[in-house]
Image (spheres, helix red, strand yellow):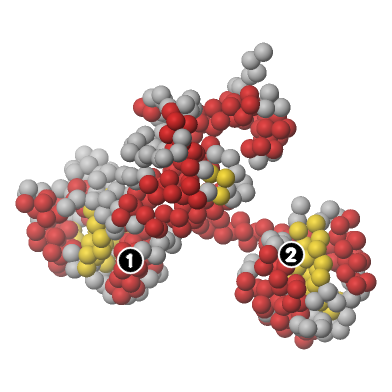
């Protein structure tokens, strides 16, 4: 049910609008002045506001500007008994969705409200979709290490200096590369990513530099390489420590001369590419072992950005965890869950061998398997198998050891994370149904999903009551 706010200093208008809108099944609040209206907007999540323009204490246009500074996506419909074209234009320029005159026409009012609510929903959906499409997240955290990384990005991004990004798996090296591109003068160009560890050594040169038709058995047509595709933009060589020595030699030449030659070709092709590289290996040790070229290392390592492990910045965990909570709950279309203080302390105590990637998966698991508030017991019970070093003075460990849904599982039996999620979701729903004596309505309310959705889950997992 959409929640609306009416701000108008005329009691008769407020009462009429409220009666009409409540008849249409909207939840409605009303107030007689803009100052109190702003306070209500701050405290409540309204889907739309109807606001008079001429009011005592605070003008409606001022209310509009102040409210949109707080909640930019909140649809405002301005209403006035002294409506003019100039007033309507001014309200639109300030961010109002629409303008209607007093006394409002009933059909016009309802259509405008419906359109305003649809627009608000579209704005929210668009933001979710954009976030899904764009992989560039914010770099979250206020630790000294993260502050230094952000400062370095601001300084280095506008230049064409090459950057070597180091750090453990899952720590966020790709995110740093993306922000270096986003804040660079090449942001309008493409960011082309190459995972050097995922491409067989015999194919890496073709992947980077392209090949001509017939240059080898499977080369049935000409192929453009990543260097050419990134021309005018940025090339991100992820896990460059796994690149073969022959490919390293060609990358070095490309960096020195800004020219490449396709596999099987003779023509030199000029490319203007900014190269960013990342690795989880100690390249100096790789050089000593003869696995990496020292001259390439010095070419790449103009600027070094080291991304610390999550365990080195545990104070950043609360803000990162909350961001993941908001994001994942929005994706699942469920109310945002909360983490108790004890739960947050338990998260901070885990070893986080998988860093940010592991934390994201952990939060998703907790959202699926926990109740409205994620507690210390939940964190211990649903922690990753690698997180066995956590200990607590409470009885949480005992709770974890008795948790039949997680302990004793053969994790190798799950082909992927989705299989594990389905298993855990099935066990969770089965436990709640048995707890509530298979009262579906009560169980749906307790786990905060629609009853029809719960019936679908019961059918999906083939759950049956044991008489």
Q: Quadrant of residue 85?
A: bottom right
Q: Quadrant of residue 229?
A: bottom left
For the point 25% across and 40% down, the residue is 218
Front in this rendered view, residue 111 or 154 = 154
For the point 45% across and 55% down, the residue is 318
Instruction: Give the numbered dot on residue 48.
Output: 2
Gap between marks 1 and 2, in whole Å?
Answer: 41 Å
Instruction: Give the numbered dot on residue 308.
Output: none
Q: Which residue is mark 1?
A: 144
Label 1 secondary element: helix
Q: Position of residue 279 (x, y in %)?
A: 23, 53
Q: Is residue 98 above or below residue 135?
A: below
- Which residue is farthest bottom? 86
Q: Earlier in the sequence, mark 1 or mark 2?
A: 2
Q: Is residue 32 above or below residue 294?
A: below
- Depth check, mark 1 against mark 2: the one in front is 1
Mark 1 neighbour class, 10 Å CA radius: few under 14, some 14 to 19, many 20 or more: few
Q: Is residue 43 above or below residue 34?
A: above
Q: Is 246 left, or right, of 20 in this rendering?
A: left
Q: Which quadrant is home to the C terminus?
A: top right
- Which residue is farthest top? 467
Q: Position of residue 82 (x, y in %)?
A: 86, 84
């Amino acid at each position: 049910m959409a929640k609306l706010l009416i701000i108008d200093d005329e009691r008769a208008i407020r009462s009429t609008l409220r009666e009409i809108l409540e008849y249409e099944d909207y939840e409605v609040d009303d107030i007689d002045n803009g100052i109190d209206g702003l306070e209500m907007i701050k405290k409540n999540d309204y889907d739309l506001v109807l606001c008079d323009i001429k009011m005592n204490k605070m003008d409606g246009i001022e209310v509009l500007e102040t409210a949109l500074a707080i909640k930019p996506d909140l649809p405002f419909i301005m209403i006035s008994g002294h409506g003019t074209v100039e007033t309507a234009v001014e309200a639109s320029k300030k961010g109002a969705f629409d303008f209607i005159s007093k006394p409002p026409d009933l059909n016009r009012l309802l259509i405008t409200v419906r359109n305003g609510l649809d627009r608000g929903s579209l704005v929210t959906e668009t933001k979710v979709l954009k976030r899904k499409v764009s992989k560039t997240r914010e770099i979250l955290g206020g630790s000294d290490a993260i502050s230094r990384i952000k400062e370095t990005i601001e300084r280095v991004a506008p230049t064409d200096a090459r950057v070597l990004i180091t750090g453990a798996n899952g720590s966020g090296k790709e995110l740093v590369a993306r922000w270096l591109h986003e804040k660079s003068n090449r942001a309008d160009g493409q960011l082309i990513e190459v995972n050097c560890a995922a491409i067989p050594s015999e194919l890496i040169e073709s992947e980077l530099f392209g090949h001509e038709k017939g240059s080898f058995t499977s080369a049935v047509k000409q192929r453009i390489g990543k260097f050419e595709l990134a021309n005018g933009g940025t090339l991100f060589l992820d896990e460059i420590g796994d690149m073969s020595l022959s490919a390293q030699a060609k990358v070095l030449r490309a960096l020195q001369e800004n020219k490449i030659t396709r596999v099987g070709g003779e023509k030199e092709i000029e490319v203007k590419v900014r190269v960013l590289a990342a690795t989880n290996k100690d390249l100096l040790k790789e050089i000593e072992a003869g696995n990496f070229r020292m001259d390439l290392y010095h070419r790449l390592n103009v600027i070094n950005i080291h991304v610390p492990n999550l365990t080195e910045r545990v104070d950043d965990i609360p803000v990162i965890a909350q961001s993941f909570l908001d994001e994942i709950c929005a994706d699942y279309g469920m109310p945002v869950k909360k983490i108790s203080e004890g739960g947050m302390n338990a998260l901070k105590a885990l070893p986080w061998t998988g860093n940010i990637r592991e934390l994201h998966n952990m939060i998703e698991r907790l959202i699926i398997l926990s109740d409205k508030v994620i507690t210390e017991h939940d964190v211990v019970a649903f922690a990753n198998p690698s997180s066995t070093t956590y200990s607590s003075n409470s009885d949480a460990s005992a709770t974890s050891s008795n948790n039949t849904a997680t302990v004793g599982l053969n994790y190798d039996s799950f082909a992927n994370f989705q299989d594990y999620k389905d298993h855990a979701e099935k066990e969770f729903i089965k436990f709640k149904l048995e707890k509530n004596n298979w009262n579906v309505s009560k169980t749906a309310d307790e786990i905060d999903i629609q009853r029809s959705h719960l019936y679908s889950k019961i059918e999906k997992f083939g759950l049956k009551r044991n008489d």
